[in-house]
Amino acid sequence: MSDLAKRAFACKHFRWMPGMRAIVPKNLPMAWGTTRACRIPHSVHPTMVPDLTDPATLGCLLALVREAWGEPLMQAMNAGGGWVGFCPAPLWTDSDGPYGTEAEALVAALEAAEGREVSDG
């Protein structure tokens, strides 16, 4: 399993969402399927991590980033030299970017939101 997926799963603001795909450890019996990647079943085993190569999972990760920052327009964009986090207001300045993939930029944004408390209004 990728370290990036483990980092995403470990984030305070991460949660499983409908439509996400999980990577299943090889030693975990799967009564509901035979592949090593599957859409999220009713119960999720604690050793599963998100499949960050799946477009639906990336979309859900983006939704979690927006929620964690309280910024509905936040996005990851390829700025020519790699992927960076971007939002209309400079809520997040990432000194580690740019990143090689959109998934890396989104996980970094989710990690950067760790200490934030977002209010509903």
Image (spheres, rainbow, N blue to C red):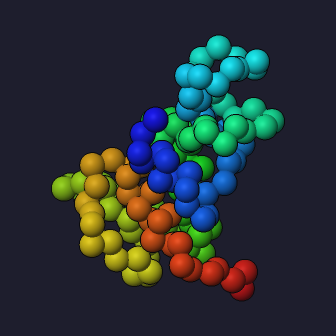
Residue at far right of view: 42
Given residues 113 and 30, the one toward you in this image is 30
Residue shown at 68% from the left, 48% from the top: 16
Horizontal side of residue 47 vs 109, given as left or right: right
Relative to 33, is 101 above or below? below
Q: Where in the figure is residue 62, as x and y percent of width and height? A: 53, 56
Relative to 70, is 41 above or below? above
Residue shown at 42% from the left, 48% from the top: 4
Residue shown at 25% from the left, 60% from the top: 98
Residue at far left of view: 81
Horizontal side of residue 71 vs 82, given as left or right: right
Given residues 99 and 29, the one toward you in this image is 29
> Which quarter of the image is occupied by the C terminus?
bottom right
Q: Is residue 110 visible?
A: yes
Horizontal side of residue 54 vs 79, given as left or right: right
Q: Where in the figure is residue 116, as x and y percent of width and height? A: 56, 80
Residue at far front of view: 27
Residue shown at 69% from the left, 83% from the top: 119
Q: Where in the figure is residue 66, as x and y percent of width and height? A: 56, 66
Q: Is residue 72 visible?
A: no
Q: Where in the figure is residue 79, as x and y percent of width and height? A: 25, 59
Q: Disc count in the image?
A: 0
Relative to 31, is 48 above or below? below
Relative to 41, is 66 above or below? below
Q: Residue 30 appears in which quarter of the rendering?
A: top right
Q: Residue 40 appears in which quarter of the rendering?
A: top right
Q: Residue 10 appears in which quarter of the rendering?
A: bottom right
